[in-house]
Amino acid sequence: MSLLRRSPGHGSAARTAAVLTALALGMAGTTLLGTGAGTSSASSHREAPLIAADPQVDNTDVYAFTSPDNPDTVTLIANWLPFQEPNGGPNFYPWADGAHYDVNIDSQGTGHPDLTYRWTFHTEDLRGTDTFLYDKGPVNNLTDDTLRFRQYYTLQELHPNCDPVTLVEHGQVAPSDTGRASMPDYGRLRQQATVQLPGGGQTVATQAADPFFLDLRVFDLLYGGNLSEVGQNTLAGYNVNSVALQIPKSRLAYKGDPARNPVIGVWSSTEKQSMRLSPGKADPVGDYVQVSRLGNPLVNEVVVPAGLKDAFNALPPSEDHNQPAVVAKVLDPEVPKLVQAIYGLPAPAAPRTDLQEIFLTGIAKAANGPLAVDLNSQLMNRDIDPNRFVPAEELRLNMSTPVTPKPDRLGVLNGDFQGFPNGRRLGDDVVDIALQVVEGATPGKFVQALAAGDKVNGPGKPFAATFPYLALPYDKAVNQK
């Protein structure tokens, strides 16, 4: 049993304080990347040169958390295609036909997926030469003839050296929300698109209000050079394409045993074929190539330098430890130096072995890093072979961590063990945590000069209490008064 399970209410006050302090030190590494979220492009939105030109397959965020209303399951959410302005018709925001949209699970710590959930989409465009409209009248049901543009998907479960198992053969996507007159009850359409899975669990592919929240005025010398330019949620009003999957923990854990092997590593990735262009046509050809990848938020954005970003997107996590230029940036990141140059706040000394532990090994005593506490490394799983373990950048979740009855947006800083980097919940306020911990905040002791953070403390639309938890998409123009 990890120390995490003996946290408040299950151990001594001294031990709890020690765990919180150790985790806070670790979060200093994590939150440097959180600060970088703003200095780059809002989590993983348009983070690398090549993927910025191909938004349909651009991973933006990954979330992994124990389902608060169904704690025997984990909810995995992955988002693509950022900055969807609700009025972006007439074609709106389809998934890319034939691309592989993957959510990967590493339960052994090898950097290779032990399990992959793969969504592959195809389009049924009924408009033809009859109309330019996405829908020709109100759409109250997914089967309504008024819906002229439809997408469907196949969901497969992939295990190494095994044939794929098809979980969903012909699932229908909840369409882009074209407006209140056209889709008066989008929640109804999303519910109709939600599919129950064989063996338990459910999934949906849907448009959603972008759940990430922050003020992007960090571009102007980190909020104006004096934290004066704060308070606007820059992503409010924009949508993303989301796949959400709720799955029993026993399906995700190594050997099907979440009690003995509670830690998983999660990342999303996208594969596509090359396109052969001819007048009026684009045909996919050749092998599938990985073009985007996302585990922990903010890594590719602010740790990986521009010249390596495209290569990082193409790598599997199993190769991360073999990339000395990337590892060097983890150990000596750029963001703290920028904060020091602009605000005069001293950067923590390199090498940042705490960062290495958080992002490449997970936090555990067995990792032999500076954070001697069991939190979320696969090295905590009792049945793995530790000789096969490799450092790999993944979002790691300890599925044994109890659900927090009242989640705190500041996570560990306010004593909430379930927050990032132990998985990632929709409401985790990465940026405000970053602004605190990068300057030395510890649990219960905040840096008062940064107490207000970016003054964006939550999303533009509240999250739901039940699956898929994502807010319904915005249906008003971003620039509407």
Image (tube, helix red, strand yellow):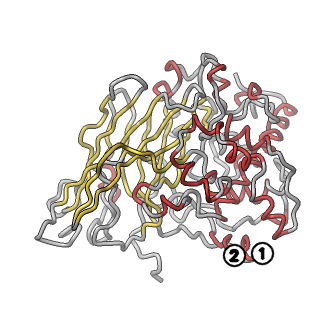
Task: Please tell me whether residue 403 is drawn above or below residue 211 in the rendered image.
Answer: above
Q: Which residue is pictured at 77% across the width and 46% down the height?
A: 331
Among the 4 quarters of the image, the one containing residue 9: top right
Left or right position of 58 against 177? right
Q: Which residue is pictured at 57% across the width and 34% down the height?
A: 318
Location of residue 40 in the rendering, given as x and y in whole percent from the top left corner: 63, 63
Q: Nearer the viewer, residue 192 or 173?
A: 173
Find disc 1 in the rendering and name its residue: 225
Location of residue 64 in the rendering, given as x and y in whole percent from the top left corner: 54, 41
Q: Which quadrant, please, contains the N terminus?
A: top right
Label 2, secondary structure: give it: loop
Label 1, secondary structure: give it: helix
Are the two marked residues, 2 and 1, in contact with CB atoms closer than 8 angstroms? yes
Task: Please tell me whether residue 211 is drawn above or below residue 218 in the rendered image.
Answer: above
Query: Which residue is situated farthest in the left direction here?
Result: 130
Among the 4 quarters of the image, the one containing residue 6: top right
Assess disc 2: are there few (<14), some (14-19) or many (≥20) residues with their C-alpha within 10 Å of its C-alpha.
few
Find disc 2 in the rendering and name its residue: 220
Q: Amino acid at mark 1?
A: Gly
Left or right position of 276 against 107? left
Location of residue 442 in the rendering, given as x and y in whole percent from the top left corner: 84, 49
Assess disc 1: are there few (<14), some (14-19) or many (≥20) residues with their C-alpha within 10 Å of its C-alpha.
few
Q: Amino acid at mark 2?
A: Asp
Q: Which residue is pictured at 41% across the width and 26% down the height?
A: 159
